[in-house]
Image: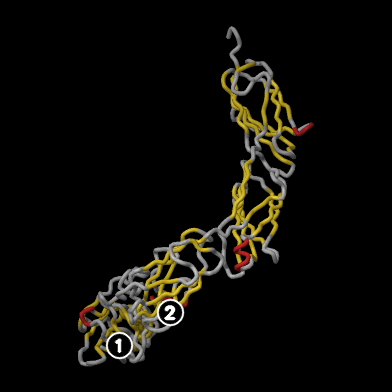
Amino acid sequence: MSFGARPRAVLACLGTLGLALAVASPASAAGGTPTTPTQLFNGYRTCSTDADRPTYVWAGTGLVVEGIPATTDTTDNSSLSVQYQVWPVTDPTQITTVTRDHAAPGFEAPGQLPSEALAEGQTYAWRAQTVAGGTASDWSAPCYVAIDDTRPANAPTVSSPNYAPDTWNPGGEPVRFTLNANGVGDVTGFEYSWQPDLPVIGTSIGDHGIPQPVDPYTDPRYFTRADAPGGSATLSLVPPTGSGRMTLWVRSLDRAYNVSETTSYSFLISSTAPTVTPDAPSPEFGRPATFTLRPSAALQSTSPVVSYSVHTVGSPDGDRTVDVKAAADGTAQVKLTLDGLYGESLSVTSKSANGWVSDAGSWSTGYDTTPTVASDVYPENGSGGGVGVPGTFTFTPKVKGIVSYTYSFDGEPEVTVAAGAHHTARIDWTPTSDGPVDLTVYATTRSGLQTAPYYYSFTVQANSGS
């Protein structure tokens, strides 16, 4: 369940509550003596038994309270009732009672205190009691809640001393932000994200329906406490990408986790991408190639580069990522075998000692690995020969290390022939019918790499007089 007036998102289903104001019909008689409900929660947050430190809750549509009923007979699964009473701490005589019938022993039994019994700005006590037949348990110790149905009136203000808004800034240093409650006295913290859709504060539901509330401020990825109610907070954040326009989205949270309107802070970061240089100007297909990675000079002077992430695209085995440690001067070398049939590209980001991740430097190359196919009798995209007229086809490589060729005429079973002198091959073929023919040929290297296929089309002439 989410907290705060807006937005609200349901993470667990309450089911049918079966609630009634005042005392409802008793549950069927259970076999043991009813015991005081345990595991008390209000608004899916932990019960506070300290009247001076109530739990602040939003109750605009009522307040869900719950506890686990039981009896002394743990083998009896007869349904029970749970009574909930709530009253303002300033007037304990104004009691409102809600009953949850048909509750299962050992499981949370939610009841909903009506919103008309819970006034904005007031503190209330509530308690729970198990009822089995005509017998009731002792009341639980009171839980205390303060009602806050009003979201912060102002969006927070956001500023940064080292990244000016709406202008280009050199990158490399984490962004320092100051978030301020902007005059709203009950703001206790802030929620922020590099995405406009900020996460909803939620509570998961565990075994036996027991809520598992978590203090959102324990997640520093999205939340930070204010230094005092209505105060401010400071952040040091590394942007999600290394360059371009960045926007931080922020909203305030009050004690009930009601959220303010969202504000944003935008700025621009110049590129900090590394350079990527192959040792050979044109690395060969299927052969190891060494690349030197060099950091942005401005980035290196701000915080030394300690590693690189090298992402390659185009390999027949799928995209790959290699992490490389940098030397003291921020440079690094990486050896890669480029085996993309049509080429391969590298995308490289650097990471600095202070956590900064640069935008990507890139390098790419294209390959034509297809074999060359030639025939004097059956020329490509032409016509020749005839039925029963043999033709010779010559396969020639465009890349080094070819040991064989595999071919197929018109989708017939593939045939593989070994490469001979100069890594070429010759085959003889005699057509049994006239008309168009498609020949497909690919080569295989010494290391087992297959080249891209070449598609060779021609037409077998009809024999004269046929």
The residue carrying pointer 1 sits among few (fewer than 14), some (14 to 19) or many (20 or more) residues within 10 Å by Cα, namely many
The residue carrying pointer 2 sits among few (fewer than 14), some (14 to 19) or many (20 or more) residues within 10 Å by Cα, namely many
- Can you say which quadrant of the picture contains the N terminus? bottom left
Q: Is mark 1 on a helix, strand or loop?
A: strand
Which of label 1 and label 2 is nearer to you?
2
Whole-angstrom CA distance, mark 1 to mark 2, is 31 Å
Q: Which of 5 and 207 is in front in this view?
A: 5
* x 30%, y 84%: residue: 146
Question: In the rendered structure, which amino acid carries the disc numbered 2?
Answer: Arg
Compared to residue 115, the image places residue 349 above or below, namely above
Q: Which of 232 and 367 is in front in this view?
A: 232
Question: In the rendered structure, which amino acid carries the disc numbered 1?
Answer: Arg
Residue 150 image offset from top left, x and y in percent: 28, 77
* x 57%, y 19%: residue: 435
Q: Name the residue under label 2.
A: 225
Residue 172 image offset from top left, x and y in percent: 56, 65
Compared to residue 441, the image places residue 333 above or below, namely below
Specify the quadrant of the image occupied by residue 42.
bottom left
Q: Is mark 2 on a helix, strand or loop?
A: strand
- Furthest toward the top, the residue is 465
Q: Which of 187 and 454 is in front in this view?
A: 187
Residue 100 image offset from top left, x and y in percent: 27, 79
Q: Mark 1 points at which residue?
A: 127
Residue 101 in view here? no
Residue 8 image offset from top left, x and y in percent: 33, 69
Q: Please give the label number shown on residue 85.
A: none
The colour mode here is: secondary structure
